[in-house]
Amino acid sequence: MKSGEITVAGGACFGQPLAELMRFFERPDWKNELMQTVNGHRARFGDRGVRESDHERRERILSEMRESRRTLERYSRRANAEQLAEVFEEALK
């Protein structure tokens, strides 16, 4: 495995084409393989997951959208912030 490469159940890597990754889910025992990998990760690193409330999720998504908008505006001066904001707000409804 290359440095920075993430391995998922069945040895598939995120650096692979999507079609190859999707074949994992065609396996008859994919859920069991995935849970074994998840449980192995938790045993090694602990369960560090964080649950979000609906409000926290909405705020995180809005924050990510605002940052994306800033990035788009930086790279494309044609982007109209008002129009993008409307699209982002509509997507959350």
Image (cartoon, rainbow, N blue to C red):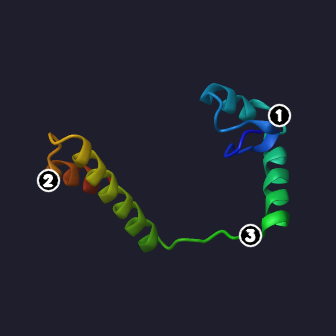
> Which residue in the protein does label 2 denote?
82
Residue at horizontal 27%, vertical 45%?
72
Badge 3 element? loop
User: Residue 18's x, y, as percent?
Assistant: 61, 30
Residue 48, placed above or below residue 17: below
Q: Which mark is residue 28?
A: 1
Q: Which mark is residue 78?
A: none
Q: Quadrant of the N terminus?
A: top right
Tell me if mark 2 has few (under 14), some (14-19) or many (20+) residues whose alpha carbon lies within 10 angstroms of its own.
few
Residue at horizontal 74%, vertical 36%?
12
Front in this rendered view, residue 92 or 3: 3
Give the mark nearest the N terminus, 3 or 1.
1
Residue at horizontal 61%, vertical 71%?
50
Q: Single out the mark in the foreground, 1 or 2.
A: 2
Confirm or deny contact between disc 2 and disc 3 (CB under 8 A): no
Give the mark nearest the N terminus, 2 or 3.
3
Front in this rendered view, residue 90 or 67: 67
> Which residue in the protein does label 3 denote?
47
Q: Quadrant of the C terminus?
A: bottom left
Residue 76 falls in image quadrant: top left
User: Residue 46's x, y, as percent?
Assistant: 78, 70
Tell me if mark 3 has few (under 14), some (14-19) or many (20+) residues whose alpha carbon lies within 10 angstroms of its own.
few
Residue 92 visible in the snapshot: no
Tell me the kind of residue under disc 2: Glu
Front in this rendered view, residue 15 or 66: 15
Tell me the kind of residue under disc 3: Asp
User: Residue 16's x, y, as percent?
Assistant: 65, 30
Tell me if mark 1 has few (under 14), some (14-19) or many (20+) residues whose alpha carbon lies within 10 angstroms of its own.
few
As measured in the structure, the alpha-carbon distance from the residue carrying label 2 to the one carrying label 3 is: 41 Å
Q: Is residue 89 left or right of residue 37?
A: left
Badge 1 element? loop
Q: Is residue 26 left or right of residue 77?
A: right
